[in-house]
Image (cartoon, rainbow, N blue to C red):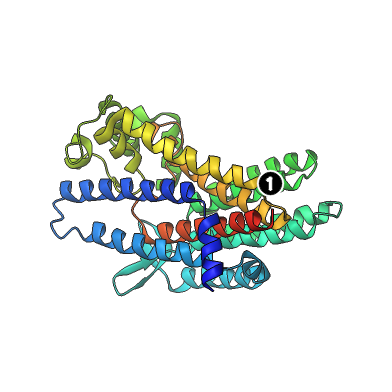
Amino acid sequence: MFRRLKIYLRNFDWLIFAAVFLLVIFGLVEIYSVALGRASLDLLNFKKQILFAGAGFVLLFVFTFIDFRFLKSLSRYLYAAGALVLAAVLLFGQSIRGTKGWFTLAGFGFQPVEFIKIILILFLANYFANLATKIKTTRHFFFSALSALFLIVLILFQPDFGAALILGAIWLIMILAAGFKKKYLIIVALAAAVILSASWTILFRDYQKQRIMTFFNPGQHSLAAGYNVSQAIIAVGSGGLVGKGVGFGSQSQLKFLPEAQNDFIFAVIAEELGFLGVILVLAFYAVFFWRCFKGLRKINNDFGIYFLLGATGLIFVQMFINMGMNLGIMPVIGLSLPFMSYGGSSLLSLLILVGMIENIIIKAKISY
């Protein structure tokens, strides 16, 4: 037992851990700053996030020591359980900001869709790994597509367009990694157009349509639907080189910037820590991705390769879209900034994902 622990710790990628740890710390600092500006003297959200961070890092190490092959063997059962939970949240869940996607217990909200992202990566990685030595046919393409689409439709009924988009991105990244022919990309584009058109007509609510329309001209709606984006752009631009200091950002502290601790925490970072703070945050993300892709070269099993590509793809796409939302170059679709935004379910799921990445990299190093 102790010998195994020693081997794992010796091969543990501490740079990945350090990058993630510092991102979480930066997030906590800005959540604390926002809480001060909201006159939240009890700092409830900040205290909750500390609890989630502590629990998340414990889970990170727990999943580091869980053999990924065990999780691989459970992928089908986890997929079925995840689908049932998504159906249950539609029936019994709580609505928050127009989305019925939460269970509430003892004052804590639980958002199942954050864990569904991991389940889809597990399921697709297992499926594509089993096809590694086979010809990838249309049947395989459509099976993987329908597997992802089933979860996406359940999520669109909440409706949570941001999470649905992320699941679609995970699937797209993994079919590209699997090496399907280019003709399938045309099918993907046509299917996406049909789904978006149907969602716009049937599922999207007025405020969600307005968010997307605002993306094309935020200035026209700067006092209405485009208010969040306009204030975020102002906050980012006002930070200058070194920022105004933690707790001294005018847009966040004077409540001009809604959802400052969630969707728009990047704008708070830019305003209070300036360009240098943003560069530092981007450097932490860069170290994380660099170490993941460096570890990818040593992985000698197809499941590990697919899983690592799906996991890093999830984090990158979510990071890119969130930052784009804050800069006004992407529509506001309710996606958090990985490791930094307030939200227990998101933080826990991402730290579990990092633990699974560590296990795959450790296993590769031991057998390399």
Q: Position of residue 277 (x, y in %)?
A: 32, 34
Label 1 element class = helix
Residue under the image location 80 percent in, 41 percent down: 181
Residue 60, position as x, y percentages in the image:
46, 61
Question: Residue at position x 30%, y 38% from top?
Answer: 269
Res 197 visible: no
Could you say where residue 256 lies in the image, as x and y percent from the top left? 22, 39
The residue that label 1 is drawn on is: 191
Quarter of the view holding residue 111: bottom left
Residue 367 in view (yes/no): yes
Image x and y of residue 45, in percent: 25, 58
For residue 344, above or below residue 103: above
Q: Is residue 215 left or right of residue 188?
A: left
Please name the residue shown 29% across and 70% down the image.
107
When the figure is inspected, residue 280 is found, relative to residue 297, above or below; the finding is above
Quadrant occupied by the N terminus: bottom right
Q: Amino acid at mark 1?
A: Ala
Apparent side of residue 274 relative to residue 216 in the rendered image (left or right): left
Badge count: 1
Residue 21 lies left or right of residue 64; in this view the side is: left
